[in-house]
Amino acid sequence: MRVISRRSLREFWEKHSTAKNSLLLWYDRITKSSIENFAQLRQLFPSADLVGNFTVFNISGNN
């Protein structure tokens, strides 16, 4: 899985400190995974959705 920008994640959690732990956990899980298709991704992240060519994740209940 390619994360577009870890920097964007960091900038977000600097403004929204309550999101930091959830984003770090998500980043760790996604970068250590070897997902080959969307079905495998949904097993790891059941709330993930495809939007065009992108995958959208519901991290921490969208809080």
Image (spheres, rainbow, N blue to C red):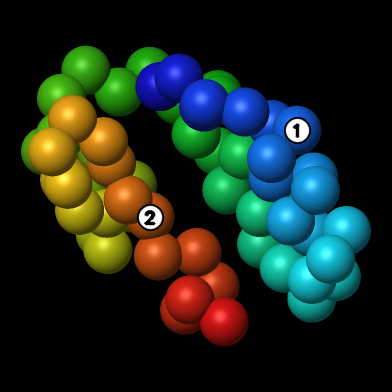
Query: Where residue 7 is drawn, which disc sits there?
Result: 1
Disc 2 crowd rating (10 Å Cα; few below 14, some 14-19, many 20+) is some
Q: Nearer the viewer, residue 47 or 14?
A: 14
Q: Give the quadrant of residue 22.
A: bottom right
* 4 relative position to 23: left or right: left
Q: Nearer the viewer, residue 14 or 28?
A: 14
Residue at 52% from the left image edge and 26% from the top image edge:
4
Above or below — where is 48 with respect to 61?
Answer: above
Query: Where residue 57 is drawn, which disc sits there?
Result: 2
Disc 1 crowd rating (10 Å Cα; few below 14, some 14-19, many 20+) is few
Q: Earlier in the sequence, mark 2 or mark 1?
A: 1
Residue 59 position, x and y percent, is 50, 64
Q: Give the quadrant of residue 27.
A: top right
Residue 61 position, x and y percent, is 47, 79
Q: Which amino acid type is shown beneath numbered disc 2?
A: Phe
Above or below — where is 2 with respect to 28?
Answer: above
* 34 relative position to 6: left or right: left
Q: Give the quadrant of residue 12.
A: bottom right
Question: Dot 2: what SS?
Answer: loop
Residue 34 position, x and y percent, is 38, 18
Q: Quadrant of the C terminus?
A: bottom right
Query: Where residue 60 is drawn, which disc sits there?
Result: none
Q: Which amino acid type is shown beneath numbered disc 1?
A: Arg
Residue 34 can be seen, yes or no: yes
Residue 28 can be seen, yes or no: no
Q: Are marks 2 and 1 in contact (CB under 8 Å)?
A: no
